[in-house]
Amino acid sequence: MKTIAIMLGSLIAFSGIGAALDGPVRTVRSSTDQFVVRGPTIAQVRTNSPSSESALIELDPSILAVSCERLKQALLRELGLVDFWRGRIYLEISPALSTNQAPIIVAKPFLDGWQYQMELPRWIEKPKLVRGLIQLLLMEIANRSAGLRSAEIPLWLSEGLSQHLVHSSEVDLVLAQPQWNFNRVNISWQARQSVRQDPLKEVRERLQSHAALTFAKLGDALPDPVPEETWKTFQASAQLFVSRLLLLPGGRATLAEMLNELPFYLNWQSAFLNAYRAQFPRLLDAEKWWAVVLVQFTGQDPTQAWSTPVALEKLNETLHPSVLVSATRKDLPQRARPGIQQIISDWEYLRQRIVLKGVTSQLLVVRFKTPPELTSLVDDYRATIENYLNKRDQVGLARSLPGLPPTRADLLVRDAAKKLNELDQKRASISATNAPPANTLARPAK
């Protein structure tokens, strides 16, 4: 074990304003002048503070300014960018906020660019602080060429990069309050292992025992409040997803390009496809790539796949989702398992779209355990439903009335049902081939 002593006295750059105390409040500028931190200072090292008994740290303007610069430099190195910042960031440590409250971020456009404000509680967990600062830094990078519309940073990107930076950094990116004071010099002791640990060790352990989120689920909004187990799985999935994107050819530059594209699109998926157009012409290609990454990373192999009869049974269950239906408006809804064709043909589109999105996500999960001889069939089902949804989103909701010429929506429904029927016939043929042999033992004569 190595023991490292870090003294903060010489690490902090102050401006003329920050050098002077204004009562119990101090304003500090970071070394690059991008961060302006204001808040109450910690008068002395406390031995009975809550941080000594929990994961909370007490924020001090001087120490927070250093942490901001450390995080920024780590992020820029990971993305291969130069520090040409344009938006100044103002951070306020507010005792009025409740302990460990999530940071409040505000982006404001001005004639010469964007400025940002972040309000923080005095006591906060390190991961929550890192997540907020990375979110803010990514927003500043993305908005450098933006107009009046601020970029929306997807949660998987900010959380994935946060986890990636923290677990791969050789030094602490966020500094806590020093533990001792000797001769008016604050000192913290840190113990580190000589051998660098695998940054994905915890991710591997998590995803080997919990199913990783699909590509589609990574971009969905999480429930509020989010269950702890769901959040841990999301963190692991996001960290692995970002780390593997960075390993693609030109991965760092492509991820930086995606950031620059975000302000010009209404959703991150469009910016993602435009930036990664060489690797993923369609979202389906990204989902397939992610499925392969998970299989390789978690160590799954064909010997762990389901047998063909079991895989066919799971596929049939997925293609007949459990839903609540009612014959009339007066009847109470009851549980049923309609087929995909019935859902597409009979249900109103907004309702069927929700169910079909869930089916496509579940098909990708089924694919993880599907034997090689059935993977193409599962992919064909998923591609057929995805193509129907994409085209139906474009043509609208209207269907023709009985006796009138069919609309484009009617033609899409007819075409999708035809393709699904063909796939059902193929699946039935495979099922018949793999059916267990009939019992041919002769029965004893009566």
Image (cartoon, rainbow, N blue to C red):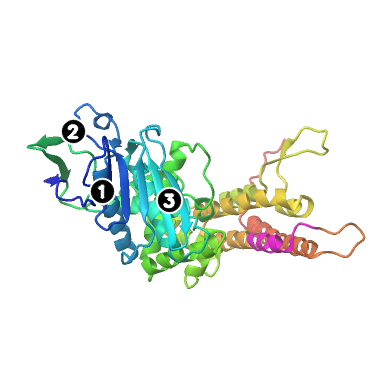
Find residue 17 and name its label: 1
Task: Give whichever of discs 1 and 2 has the lower sequence position.
Answer: 1
Label 2 and label 3: CA atoms lie apart by: 40 Å
Report how far apart the C-alphas of labels 1 and 2 lie in the structure. Answer: 21 Å
Residue 21, image x, y percentages = 23, 40
Screen quadrant of the C terminus: top right
The amino acid on which the numbered mark 2 sits, given as a three-letter code, is: Gln
Q: Which mark is residue 237?
A: 3
Asked if marks 2 and 3 touch (Cβ < 8 Å), the reply is no
Residue 200 visible in rendering: no
**Residue type beneath disc 1:** Ile
Which image quarter is the N terminus in? top left
- Say which label, 2 or 3, has the lower sequence index: 2
| Residue 174: x %, y % from top left | 27, 46
Mark number for residue 44? 2
The residue range painted magenta reads: 386-398
- Local packing at callout 1 (Cα closer than 10 Å; few below 14, some 14-19, many 20+) is few
Residue closer to the observer: 40 or 16: 16
Identity of the residue furthest to the top in this view:
48
Asked which secondary structure carries label 1, the reply is loop
Question: Is residue 90 visible to the viewer in this orientation of the structure?
Answer: yes
Q: What label does residue 245 carry, if any?
A: none
Label 3 sits on what residue type?
Answer: Ser
Q: Residue at x 72, y 62 (%)?
A: 416
How many numbered tags mark residues here?
3
The percent position of residue 14, horizontal first and vertical second, equals 22, 50
